[in-house]
Image (cartoon, rainbow, N blue to C red):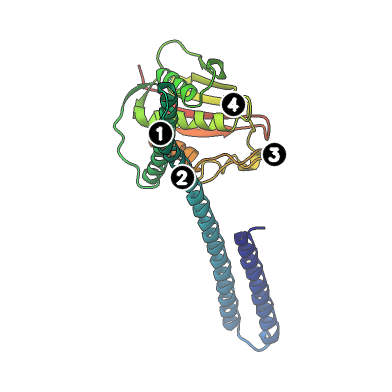
Amino acid sequence: MTRRQKAIAFFVALCVLLVGAAISLNVSWIVITAERARIQVLVLGILTFGLIIAGLIIYTVFLVLEIKRNEEHDTFINAVTHELKTPIASIRLYLETLQSRPLNDEQRRGFYDVMLADADRLHHTVDQVLKAGVASQKPKVIARSSVDMSALANECVDLALARHHLQRNAIVLESHDEGPLMVRGDAEELRTVLSNLLDNAVKYSADIVRITVAVAAPSPDTVWVRVQDRGVGIPRKQLKRIFRRFYRVQTRGFKQVKGTGLGLYIVRSIARAHGGRVFAQSEGEGRGATFTLELPRLAS
């Protein structure tokens, strides 16, 4: 049990004891004074004790929530620090090697490729933090234009294959409708949504990456993009929590995935800003997960 969990348990137990003591005093006071006191005095006493009990409960609830929020912030800071320090250390190491040792052209190109990949990782981490900050504020005005979701999904699949160095058949794109499936929105924001969903699917695919991306129109006024993996799955109790800020899926027998815990929070925020929604489905641990982005279809 962690230090904060012990603190939460202590304050919950203290609240229960105080509420129990208040109820005991209230009952004892009513029994002792029932024969002599007026009804108005009894009612006033009961209301007073009721307010005290309610205050204790509310105070404890807010205290526990604050402790949990602080824990989430600490986890986030640790994750971001790791995500920033690792590529910086890598870039520094390669630069020192380039500076101190003579290398041939092939070795130099290999070092440059690694450093560019680390720079992309840094950019991605910073971009996630900035987008999460924007998402937590008031909804901004989106520069809306027509976006072809089939073309955008194909672009994001190619990007994910290159970023994670995957074989072409690792991510399969399916389109179940002929012609373009258009929505109105910000292409860059929607690209962020699909990229985050694909990155998550790759991270939680364990050893073998097998992902299916399906673009379809289940109704005349709706467009769906579904990202299905065959990875570690999501426990049913966590399905409603995974879109919270800083939350990361916890599964037995699978190592903690690196990241900031902001990807799905950003996905949900962007989906809502576009008048749509995103939801997850999973049969449980070890049975994969499916994320569905639903957006209003642009009338042709």
Mark earlier in primary sequence (3, 4)? 4
Quarter of the image with the C terminus is top left
| Residue identifier under label 2 | 85
User: CA–CA distance between discs 1 and 3?
Assistant: 40 Å
| Residue identifier under label 3 | 253
Q: Nearer the viewer, mark 3 or mark 4?
A: 3
Q: Secondary structure at mark 3?
A: loop
Name the residue rendered at 54%, 67% in the picture. Answer: 59
Q: Are marks 1 and 3 in contact (CB under 8 Å)?
A: no
> Which disc, if any, is residue 229?
4
Q: Label 3 sits on what residue type?
A: Gly
Mark earlier in primary sequence (3, 2)? 2
Name the residue rendered at 41%, 11% in the picture. Answer: 179
Quarter of the image with the N terminus is bottom right
Q: Label 2 sits on what residue type?
A: Lys
Name the residue rendered at 44%, 25% in the picture. Answer: 107
In-image side of 78 versus 28 (left or right): left
Q: Label 1 sits on what residue type?
A: Leu
